[in-house]
Image (cartoon, rainbow, N blue to C red):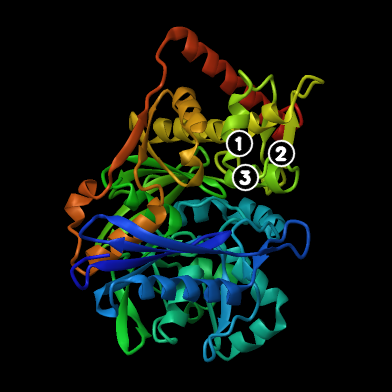
Amino acid sequence: MECEKGKFIVAVDEGTTSTRACLYDVSKKKFVLSRSASIAQIYPQPSFVEENANEIYANTLSVLIEMIESAPDLSSVAGIGITNQRETVVAWDRKSGKPLYNAIIWQCRRTSEEMEELSATHGEEIRRKTGLVMDAYFSASKIRWLIRNVPAIAEKLSRGEVCFGTVDSFLIYKLTDGKAFVTDATNASRTMLFDLTTLDYDDGLLNLFGIPRDSLPRVVSCDERVGDFHYRGKAIPVCGVAGDQQAALFGQACVRAGMSKITYGTGLFMLCNTGETPFFSRKGLITTVAAKIGKKVTYAFEGSVFNAGSTIQWLRDHLGFFASSQESEGLAESVPDNGGVYLVPAFTGLGAPYWKGDARGMISGLTRASTKAHITRAALEAMAYSAKDLSDAMTEESGVNIDVIRADGGASANDFLMRFQANVLGVAIDRPQEKESTALGAAFLCGIGLGLIDPSALDEYRLRERLFSPDREEKSVKTYRGFYEGWKAAVDQCVYDGKKS
């Protein structure tokens, strides 16, 4: 591996089910190596989802060091960029850095009831300030749960000895030996404590959730150098931080208003850059910070679907439909259509645009002729239908005509899904050569912060692999419209039990 010294960036992507580190060669504009380590999820009670925060850090440290050691030499490593699963909360001891409880994962629904109660009195205020909907998905209610239910945390909090943060904050704190207690604006915008207009924590919301301001990290720009990771006598800058979906938007070079991307991961996330003014949704979308580069802030509409790739994992691991997720493509294509079968993957409730935390997964339309191929196809199709739910809402509320959507994440490698997605949306799907757009965004932000990458030239770094264009034939359009109507009927049955109140 040959490169000028100081031209490699290690991008750390701490995801929901695994932690990955990738070595990015700035001169070649590509990743040259990556490693990952899986993370076990913990389910102490129904609707509770946790992970061991020590395992998250240990895995991060392991893959990070492997990438550093894989560079030509230590001096060639310019910096470390970090992207992370968002909304997940960690509480740790300010002095020792030791976690005080398991990380509460973004999928966790333990605070659903109290968020429903707060919605009636504070829902509009929170939407207006934060751009978020009242849901257990976001961080604030998780932090309040920790304060109320973990005595050690409440005790230490009274002495100012507790740090609360999203995963980026925890990792940076550990990697910098406690010198940097920060988060970036994209992660802060997911806490339900951050005002999108003032770009600061809101005192009223802090009081509402009972969270002291000094227990939260300082908010920084996405390209800011926040500290150093000391390794074998070298101080390696930690620079470039963003939540995973905003990092993917940046990695896809969606830097202008109207540019959109879909990431297929554990969940499905669609973001549309709306420019430098935040628009607030009435259709169940989230308004979020897309990026803060220096002092410039851009915003995005986002739709979050809780289960996408996790549905394929469920078919693989729990039902034994196939040994590898890659086999789902061939199985889905072995039948001409879904045979009338629809799968609504509400395993942890339904996210945007429905926001029904009490919804549960459902398979409908089964007959004696239904096979695992039909169910697998229905699971893949559900991702495409969910994306159309989001795309339609974004187009209606923003007035932006979306003609191309950039796709990334594991399931974007599935050609069947990409073709089906293009036809359901009636929009071209642009798949890049580098599908790890989340890690790529972290590398870009780090490179920009260190002066190695020109932010105005990101399109030069994002290369297309294939464009999937929709079939414009009238018959085809009508067919896919009918498929989508079947999905809407299935969702209605799941959410409203066949009738709307």
Quadrant position of residue 441: bottom left
Q: Residue at x 20, y 73 (%)?
A: 5
Label 3 crowd (10 A; few <14 / some 14-19 / many >=20):
few
Label 2 crowd (10 A; few <14 / some 14-19 / many >=20):
many
Residue 176 at x, y percent in the picture: 40, 83
Q: Residue at x 68, y 40 (%)?
A: 322
Please, what is the three-letter code of the amino acid marked with disc 3?
Answer: Ser
Provide the residue designation for mark 1: 328
Q: Residue at x 62, y 88 (%)?
A: 156
Quadrant position of residue 42: bottom right
Residue 321: image tag: 2
Provide the residue designation for mark 3: 324
Quadrant position of residue 373: top right
Q: Are marks 1 and 2 in contact (CB under 8 Å)?
A: yes
Residue 486 shown left or right of residue 299 in the figure: right
Q: Secondary structure at mark 1?
A: helix
- In the figure, 485 relative to 214: above or below? above
Give the quarter of the figure containing the C terminus. top right
Residue 129 shown left or right of residue 119 in the figure: left
